[in-house]
Amino acid sequence: MDLDALYARAVQAAENSYSPYSRFRVGAALLAADGEIFTGCNIENRSYGLAICAERSALAAAVSAGKRKFIAVAIATPDADYPVGPCGACRQVLSEFMGKNAPVYFGGRSGGRVTASIGELLPHDSLYELAEK
Ligand code: THU
């Protein structure tokens, strides 16, 4: 699995970010189990609390296209000079459709990249026993 190629798709997706309020662009690229890639960006609103994160926007596109199993996700935050991991809500939502060991690969404007599994990012997964198997 080429996480750098997936990351390049996340960087591209961040270009479509609609983030006039935070001026913080985010792009996400999800690799489906069948090899297809789905991307998303953050979408803000003048009612600030309605912002949709890039990760959830990519998931909405992918699930709407009939995919339910993802083996990796890359997240790009070109306006930060350090790698920014997914927010807590996105960790929970990603965990619905990704295995505990699936890599989450993220980076900022500079070269540093971080890889962590969903299991590491969401320890003691809430409601794990209710998860679809
Ligand atoms: N954001 C994401 O898209 N993903 C995250 O995981 C963290 C936050 C967005 C939401 C908002 O549009 C902007 O980044 C600043 O919080």
Image (tube, grey):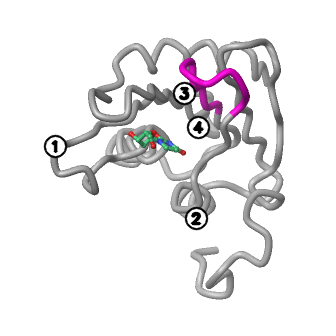
**Are circles 2 and 4 on residues that touch, CB within 8 Å?**
no
Asked if 6 appears above or below 114 in the picture, the reply is: above
**Are circles 1 and 2 on residues that touch, CB within 8 Å?**
no
Badge 1: residue crowd in 10 Å (few <14, some 14–19, many ≥20) = few
Q: Which residue is mark 2?
A: 92
Amino acid residing under circle 2: Gln
* The magenta stretch spans residue 94: no
Q: Residue at x 62, y 45 (%)?
A: 70
Q: Which residue is mark 1?
A: 46
Judged from this view, the residue extending furthest toward the left is 46
Residue range (magenta): 74-83
Badge 3: residue crowd in 10 Å (few <14, some 14–19, many ≥20) = few
**Are circles 4 and 3 on residues that touch, CB within 8 Å?**
yes
Q: Which residue is mark 4?
A: 32
Residue 36: numbered disc: 3
Badge 2: residue crowd in 10 Å (few <14, some 14–19, many ≥20) = some
Depth check, mark 2 against mark 3: the one in front is: 2
C-alpha span from label 1 to label 4: 32 Å
Q: Secondary structure at mark 1?
A: loop
